[in-house]
């Protein structure tokens, strides 16, 4: 699916919308990162250069049909970047499964916005890919994401040793 086609489809629920991250989003993305995002998502504190490289790499993945599809999560009322969500189709646990990761900036947390972003990603995956299940891989100490996985209807699969360390794995069928 091309970037232009996706941009016209409007991945939105009226509260948030998903769109491609661009170079213009880099400073806002960096400003939104806090210690939790650095620990659980980024693997350490980001810099403007690392955020710009992340955006460029994801744009290249979109352009070439690569395995990553990263979106910014934006607030509809203010048009502000409030987080991101990404699917990695190369990190398949089993056939038909894709790995999704996300982060919502601190001032926007605990408002149900990550759940909304996951549901919009579900819609994208149903319409643009052959995926059948979303997998969330969550560090056991990340209690907020563990609770979100359960609220979002994911089923706990167990604890697994992964390259990043021990991870809780949750799976949800894509809504059909």
Image: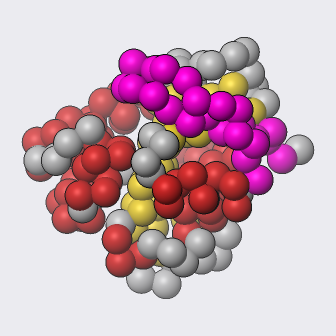
Q: Position of residue 67 (x, y in %)?
A: 50, 23
Apparent side of residue 145 relative to residue 84 in the rendered image (left or right): right
Magenta segment: 153-175
Q: Nearer the viewer, residue 163 or 134?
A: 163
- At 56% from the left edge and 36% from the top edge, which residue is drawn? 168
Q: Nearer the viewer, residue 8 or 152?
A: 152
Q: Position of residue 157 (x, y in %)?
A: 70, 32
User: Compared to 24, does 96 lie above or below?
Assistant: above
Res. 114 visible in picture: yes
Q: Position of residue 74 (x, y in %)?
A: 45, 67
Q: Nearer the viewer, residue 76 or 152?
A: 152
Determine the residue located farthest toward the top in the rendered image: 95
- Quadrant in which the C terminus is drawn: top right
Is 79 magenta? The answer is: no
Res. 123 visible in picture: no
Q: Position of residue 129 (x, y in %)?
A: 70, 30
User: Compared to 111, does 143 lie above or below?
Assistant: above
């Amino acid at each position: 699916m091309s970037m232009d086609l996706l941009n016209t489809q409007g991945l939105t629920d009226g509260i948030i919308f998903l769109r491609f991250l661009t170079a213009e989003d880099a400073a806002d993305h960096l400003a939104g990162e806090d210690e939790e995002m650095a620990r659980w998502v980024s693997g350490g504190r980001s810099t403007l250069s690392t955020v710009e490289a992340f955006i460029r790499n994801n744009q290249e993945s979109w352009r070439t049909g690569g395995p990553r599809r990263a979106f910014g999560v934006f607030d509809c009322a203010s048009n502000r970047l409030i987080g991101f969500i990404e699917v990695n189709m190369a990190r398949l646990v089993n056939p038909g499964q894709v790995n999704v990761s996300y982060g919502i900036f601190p001032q926007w947390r605990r408002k149900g916005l990550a759940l909304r972003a996951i549901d919009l990603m579900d819609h994208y995956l149903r319409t643009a890919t052959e995926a059948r299940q979303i997998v969330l891989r969550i560090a056991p100490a990340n209690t907020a994401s563990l609770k979100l996985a359960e609220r979002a209807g994911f089923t706990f699969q167990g604890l697994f040793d992964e390259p990043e360390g021990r991870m809780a794995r949750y799976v949800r069928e894509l809504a059909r």
